[in-house]
Amino acid sequence: MENRKKLNIGASILNADYLNLGKEIEKAGNAGADFIHLDVMDGNFVPEITFGQMMIKSIKKHAAIPVHAHLMIQNTDEQLKSFIETGADLIIIHAESCRHLYSCLKLIKDNNIKAGLALNPATPVSFIENVIEIIDFLLIMTVEPGFGGQKFIESMVQKIKKAADILEEYNLKTRKRFSFDIAVDGGINEATIKKATDAGANSVIIGTAFYNSNDPSKTVSGLKEAAQKTIKQAL
Ligand code: DX5
Ligand code: ZN
């Protein structure tokens, strides 16, 4: 059985115009993005600092589409609770910065928030094996986290396939139908999206491709079209 889901596109505001953030957030919804992706960086797990809990709260108040928080922070275990309180619809934590991964994912779920797991390019996809039953979202980093505008790492295509296979095998073994979104983050454009969706991704994050575009609606519809042939419709 395959992980059959419809394609969702998330707009990452990392490279948006921060002085006009309200408009930039609106732009994402108006252009047909399915969710907003907020890159929280602490200057420790990754070199730069972006924004934190208060910004997520404000954005959540005004956003017309779901808000996802991608936590690129060193002290996930210590800070998670305060991010749960922001009202984000989905919280993504990194396997590399979380000491008690199972408990942290469980804490997110226990608060009725969707739980996402992010894996850096060099982190084995086998990390998901023991948390399949609790994650809603797997974020496969297709660039090293920290910056927008980087080049898609081609070898991540195999990792996406592996994730889809692991899920399928798990469901066969347990005779259950667990499911999570397989998302990719980094270097997505019209040339790379198809590689990701062909491999089994059903969710993509776009940063510079969206916020540097002169016609964001066209960018979103163009990407959806480029991926269309490979995405299986929802069951
Ligand atoms: C990188 C961030 C991404 C980033 C993607 O650390 O996690 O979400 O905004 O930007 P692009 O699409 O430009 O690679
Ligand atoms: Zn991100």
Image (cartoon, helix red, strand yellow):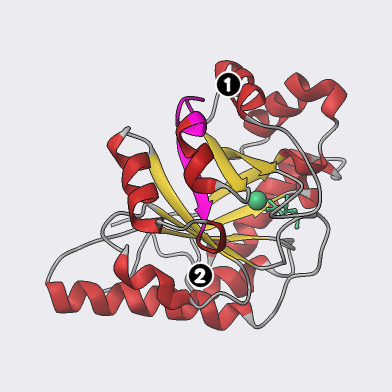
In the picture, the quarter occupied by the N terminus is bottom left
Judge by depth and name the residue closer to the eye, 107 or 125: 107
Residue 26, can we see it? yes
Residue at image position (74%, 55%) is 46
In the image, which residues are magenta? 82-94
Residue at image position (76%, 38%) is 50
Q: Indicate the quadrant where residue 18 lies.
A: top right
Residue at image position (77%, 47%) is 43
Q: Which residue type does callout 2 highlight?
A: Thr
Badge 1 density bin: few <14, some 14–19, many ≥20, Cα 10 Å? some
Residue at image position (50%, 62%) is 95
Q: Please state the horizontal and vertical placement of residue 119, each as a whole percent of the image.
A: 55, 65
Q: Please state the horizontal and vertical placement of residue 158, each as a whole percent of the image.
A: 55, 83
Badge 2 density bin: few <14, some 14–19, many ≥20, Cα 10 Å? some
The kind of secondary structure element at disc 1 is: helix
Label number found at residue 57:
1
Vertical side of 42 occupied by 151: above or below: below
Judge by depth and name the residue closer to the eye, 42 or 117: 42
In the picture of the structure, the residue carrying the numbered disc 2 is 230
Residue 34, can we see it? no
Is-magenta flag for residue 88? yes
Q: Which residue type does callout 1 highlight?
A: Lys
Mark closer to the chain start, 1 or 2: 1
Q: Please state the horizontal and vertical placement of residue 213, each as a whole percent of the image.
A: 84, 45
* Numbered disc in front, either 1 or 2: 1
